[in-house]
Amino acid sequence: MDRIPILKMGEFLLVTIQVDMHDRLAMTLQDDLTALIVKHRARGVMIDISALEMVDSFIGRMLSNIANMARLLDANTVVVGMQPAVAITLVELGLPMRGIRTALDVEKGMAVLRAAKLAFGGSNGTNGRGRGGD
Amino acid sequence: MGVDVAATDTHRIAEAEDIVAVRQAVRLKAVEIGLNLVDQTKIVTATSELARNTLIHGGGGSMTLEVVHNGHRRGIRLTFEDHGPGIADIGLAMKDGYTTAGGMGLGLGGAKRLSDEFDIDSTPGQGTRVSVLRWGKV
């Protein structure tokens, strides 16, 4: 498998990571997502990692990069479905996951994206869109 | 260290796909010896960090996977070896945020925190050997 599929749903892009990614696949996803945000004028990106049994510093950095790049392109990012064991491990690993907003599941993640869009609706470049960790 | 080695196998780390392969091999073994889910996740994540170091900094190498016993405790010991440029200042390399490859610099320190025992030996010009051990709960 060479690419992780990205689904468009209205103004949002949805990604479900279902494979144990090698590093190049993670980089491809980062590039594909930023290109599609611009192409579809997407206002939000949701990344479902519930199938991921491990997040190491490389994948963590990819998620941070996506969130930061999306922000520069006027889109919010939410990462959903992190397994508890992954969260525990990330904290011990010392990964900051800066700028990443999370939600427990897809439904809550969608609510986060909708709320963020409503709060800052037609604007571009307003500050303080409520991302954590900055 | 007073441990008995029950089983050993060695995996090559020569390209990015091998990082995925060694993660999966360690996961299988961790499940097999009955590590709980959190301990599995920790040792697999440490594996990923160290395998990437072996590939990127060491120019490739190998991982040796051993099942070890100490009385009725069982654990996994992983030894990553390369014949790359080695590490001149191990203390500096262990520090979070120190990186020479544009990563996050969490590999060594992070792997140490995710393990019960950690050992590193490196000679500039000759290579690096890192060993981690994770015990299962009794």
Image (cartoon, helix red, strand yellow):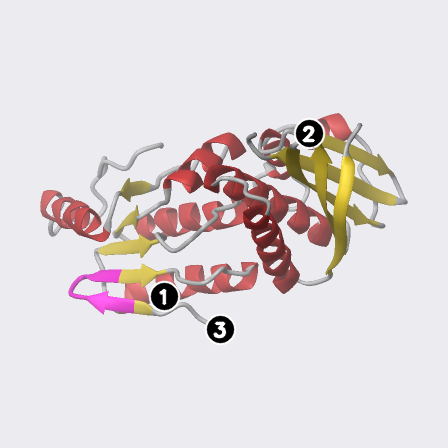
Residue type, label 3: Asp
The answer for which chain carries disc 1 is A
Q: Main secondary structure of the magenta part?
A: strand
Disc ID at residue A2: 3
Name the quadrant containing residue A39: bottom left
Name the quadrant containing residue A23: bottom right
User: What x and y, as percent, mark residue A79?
Assistant: 32, 48
> Circle 2 — which element?
strand
> Circle 3 — which element?
loop
Position of residue A37 in the picture relative to residue B45 (left or right): left
Q: Which residue is mark 2?
A: B117
Disc ID at residue A35: 1
The answer for which chain carries disc 3 is A
Residue type, label 2: Glu
Residue at (79% x, 47% y) in the render: B81
Residue at (39% x, 60% y) in the render: A17
User: What x and y, as percent, mark residue B37?
Assistant: 47, 42
CA gap between label 2 and label 3 equals: 37 Å
In the picture as drawn, the residue positioned furthest to the bottom comes out as A1
Mark 2: few/some/many CA within 10 Å (<14, 14-19, 20+): some
Asked whether the beta carbons under mark 2 and mark 3 sit within 8 Å of each other, the answer is no
Give the mark count: 3
